Image (spheres, rainbow, N blue to C red):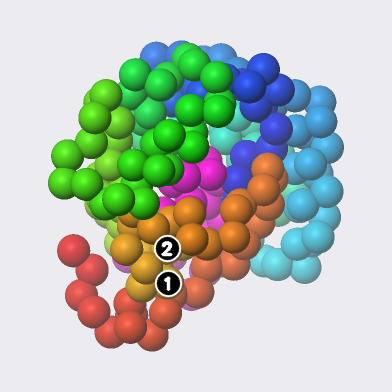
Amino acid sequence: MRHGESEANRAGLIVSDPRVGVGAYGLTDEGRKQVKSSLEEYASVPVTAIYTSDFARARETAEMAGEFFQADTYVVTDLLRERFFGDYDGREDRYYHSVWEIDSRSPRKYPAHIESPGHVKNRILKLIREIEDRHEGDVVLLVSHGDTLQILMAVLSDIPAPHHRSLPHLEKAEIREIIPAESFIAQEVL
């Protein structure tokens, strides 16, 4: 699940620095409505565990989900954090497209201290392995951010991480079931 509309979304800002995003830029009233609506669509799903980014907007989304599903496990983790957009952090959200253009070229080195899709992939797959070890057979809800979740979905679909934008865009508060491709399941995770 992607977080609902945040104050950063409303302001048109990139907020990817944990020194800012963990304590500020939570959900707007519209974001809370989006989250409530999405959760109601999944009322019949027996979610038993919720893992969330420690950024305020994701944490607030996950708290709503935790209350809604009455989940047994609730974990806040930096492994689900927003992708760090480096020198673009704090700037207008139109700069996301600049980073996605860089991603599409799959460079070996990223400029401006941008966190590469490969780095995001490695941290989120570490978490997936931990979850699989602890929650076999459970329905687990991950609450995170657009790029982080898009990269996860790309990797599990056997698409190279830098090409995560080739997948349909994840909307605010959208919940998507993640089903790994057979080719992903067959390979050994890093």
**Residue labelled with disc 2:** 154
Magenta segment range? 130-151
* Residue nearest the observer in this picture, 82 or 115: 115
Quarter of the image with the C terminus is bottom left
Instruction: Give percent across and percent down for residue 32.
Output: 77, 34
Residue type at mark 2: give it.
Ala
83 magenta-colored: no
Residue at 39% from the left image edge and 14% from the top image edge: 19
Q: In the picture provided, is 151 more to the left or to the right than 141?
A: left
Q: Which mark is residue 157?
A: 1
Residue at 76% from the left image edge and 52% from the top image edge: 39
Q: Determine whether 2 is above or below 137 in the image.
A: above
Residue type at mark 1: give it.
Ser
Residue at 82% from the left image edge and 55% from the top image edge: 40
Q: How many marks?
A: 2
Q: Which mark is residue 100?
A: none
Q: In the picture provided, is 72 more to the left or to the right than 136?
A: right
